[in-house]
Amino acid sequence: MHGLFKAITISHKKASLELRGQIALNEEESKALMLKIREAFDVSEVLVLSTCNRTEVYYVSENNLGEEIIRLIASQKILVSSEILPFFEIISEHSEAVRYLFEVAMGLHSQVVGDLQIPNQVKHAYQWAADVQMAGPFLHRLLHTIFFTNKKVVQETSFRDGAASTSYAAVEVMESFLPLLNNPKVLVVGLGEIGEDVCRTLADKGYKNITLTNRTKAKAEALASQLGFEVADYQDVNNNILESDIVISSVRCESPIITKETLKDKTLAVKYLIDLSVPNSIASDIEEVAGVVAYNLDEIQTRANEALQRRMDSIPQVMDIIGDAIAEFNNWSQEMIVSPTIQKLKGALEQIRKEEMARYVKELSAEEAEKVEKITSSMMQKIIKLPVIQLKAACKRGEAETLIDVLNDLFNLEKQTV
């Protein structure tokens, strides 16, 4: 299995959001692609990871199938393969592909370093592969090693501490005063890039009682339908603001849309306002209204920058943890080379034992036959122990092939089936 792992990737590093959106694969499409790869190339292990920032295919094969798989994706999405090919990166070297998946799963290649969503997205991709029987021994071991490594990163570093993006930081600020409110009504005003990110973050965290309002109502309705939120008319935004406990505004405007005048009819209840707009959509003097607590973009961004710096400072420690995990995984991966030989050797010795037992067992009583069975089985286990130890040691030295050839010649293992 060692030396066969490969990958293709298209991500935010080379491709526009529009192109990434055209190539992105949902669960059904990902599973269909895996089955097409199996049918077309007789590949038994495939993982498809597709998010808003990347679409990647990892596979186990002796052959470099990168361009062929890209053409399959183009065909499935009705795109011209020659036009999308330059935006893909093809990783055909085993150790590079293994390290790359580790780093992607940790969030080292995310737009926001240490992205909190990527581990779960990798888990979903793994589940989809398992659902269609495209996760074999190699992927099972690799993914579980990655999940364990992620736990170590969380426990031993600051790499996932704090909110390192504006949207996460805004939600983190909101969470700081949620304990003070009883089932608060949350209103998100404006669904540009930041506003949409905030909504998706709220959905990922399982929050309900969220209402969206946007100048283009169709966009609000589409996103609300996808995330399970409510929609309000933008024309009635002032009333919606008054009725909400928390308002997160990222609407683009020439002057503030939320002012002291907007809140003149506010009740005595405390209201929290978060402004993510440039220019500001919430007036700077809004806290002069009794019971209003406001946060502006600079305050939110400061929190995000501090968290991002902590994550950046943790990268060397994360890389060390990844390095240790890959070294351990590679030991297992290399031993996979000798596993068929070990099984064939066991089979050859077991066949000899059974043939010799068959010659004499008729002359033995049931009690004697049972004793001989135990003795010969024990002898076989002790005989095979040393070759197995030597094979595994040869793997670590990179000398397994020589020892495999010797054992094949000594025991005629080529005729054996695993």
Image (cartoon, helix red, strand yellow):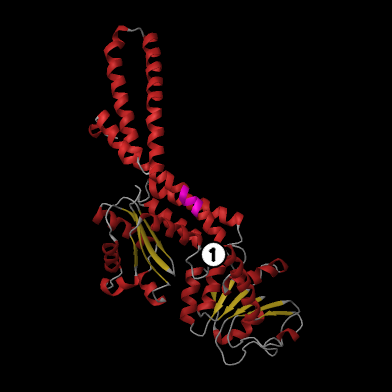
Residue at 32 percent across and 24 percent down: it is 350
Please name the predominant secondary structure of the magenta segment in the image: helix
User: On the rendered image, what quadrant is the C terminus found in?
Assistant: top left
Occupied quadrant, residue 339: top left
> Of residues 378 and 386, which is closer to you in this image?
386
Viewed as shown, does residue 267 lie left or right of 48?
A: right
Give, as a single range, the part of the protein colored magenta. Answer: 323-327
In this picture, is 342 found above or below 274? Answer: above
Residue 103, percent from left and from top: 47, 60
Using the rendered image of the protein, determine whether residue 99 is visible from the camera's viewpoint.
Answer: yes
* Residue 252, x across and y down, in percent: 55, 87
Secondary element under disc 1, as helix, strand or loop, is loop
Q: Which residue is mark 1?
A: 114
Residue 292 percent coordinates (x, y): 72, 80
Label 1 environment density (alpha carbons within 10 Å; few <14, some 14–19, many ≥20): many
Q: Amino acid at mark 1?
A: Gly
